[in-house]
Image (cartoon, rainbow, N blue to C red):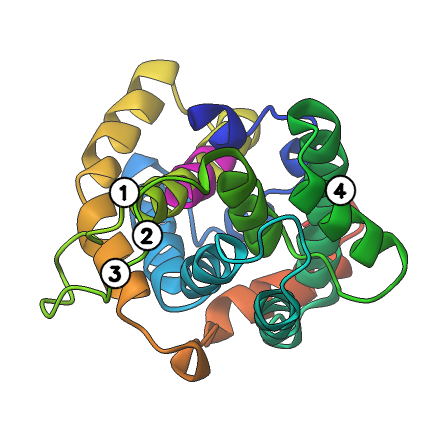
Amino acid sequence: MMQFGDSMLPTGAFAFSNGLEAAVQTKVVHDAETLRQFTETALEQAASGDAVGVAWAVRAARHARDGENDEAMGLLRLTDNALFVRKLPEESRSMFTRTGKKLAEMGAAVTASPLASRWLELIRAGGTPGTYPVTLAVLFAAMHGDRAPAVPAAADPAAPPDDPLLQEALTVHLYGVVMGILNAALRLMRLTHIEAQALLYGLTARFDELAGRAAATPLEHMSNYAPMTDILGAAHARAHVRLFMS
């Protein structure tokens, strides 16, 4: 399960800092505490945005069978487009689709799943943007789609999803958000590996709550409202010296 949440997975994600490089350059992030705040904010944004897309894509993908269920595939494409249009900075859109396509290519080759192959065909044909969150959901459904069927989200928004597959996919997505930022931080600022692990340990305690919130959010309420992140992304795109692509 955690294989697909590893920031060193060959999808090119290691080349993106999720806005951290600009945050460090502008002194928004300058020590372990401000890094924790930045990463926790990224998790909050994911819970109301990208993770909502993961949840809806998992629900659709598990009913797509081998990509032959037109209704389920239509919902996947709808979710994919909804995620794409909510990413305003050009760098963020580029990261979204580049890593998504790479993950689709790797997933189709590794799992030999007809669903994963069908999704990759759609991306290559330009039939869908191929965002990373939806591709991640497709791979989870391709590998474990025969597990317990999806059930309605818990009444308590802070409760973890009752669906094991949905919970695992959301956990992996949130883990990837944290690790992408922390790995970038190790290259951008004075941070020890022990400090990074301490931050990771503290932030993972919120995963159940954030996954529950994402699972309980209607697709039409998905939001990527993050003005500071968008401003940092715009500043990074015009920076003269850059170690990362975002």
Q: Horizontal and vertical percent for residue 21?
A: 59, 45
Say which amino acid is labelled 1: Pro
Q: Residues within 10 Å of mark 3 (few under 14, many from 20)?
A: few
- Residues 239 and 82: in front is 82
Helix, strand or loop at mark 2? loop
> In front: mark 1 or mark 2?
2
Q: Residues within 10 Å of mark 1 (few under 14, many from 20)?
A: some
Residue linked to disc 1: 164
Say which amino acid is labelled 3: Val
Say which amino acid is labelled 2: Pro
Disc nearer the start of the sequence (2/4): 4
Disc nearer the start of the sequence (1/3): 3
Asked whether the viewer can see residue 185, the reply is no
Say which amino acid is labelled 4: Ser
Query: Which residue extends farthest bottom?
Result: 220
Q: Residues within 10 Å of mark 2 (few under 14, many from 20)?
A: few
Asked whether the viewer can see residue 124, the reply is yes
Q: Horizontal and vertical percent for residue 23?
A: 51, 52
Q: Is residue 121 above or below residue 196?
A: below
Disc nearer the start of the sequence (3/4): 4
> In front: mark 2 or mark 4?
2
Disc nearer the start of the sequence (1/4): 4
What's the CA distance linking mark 2 and mark 4?
A: 22 Å
Residue linked to disc 2: 149
- Residues 193 and 62: in front is 62
Residue linked to disc 4: 117
- Residues 76 and 177: in front is 76
What's the CA distance linking mark 2 and mark 3?
A: 6 Å
Q: Are marks 1 and 4 in contact (CB under 8 Å)?
A: no
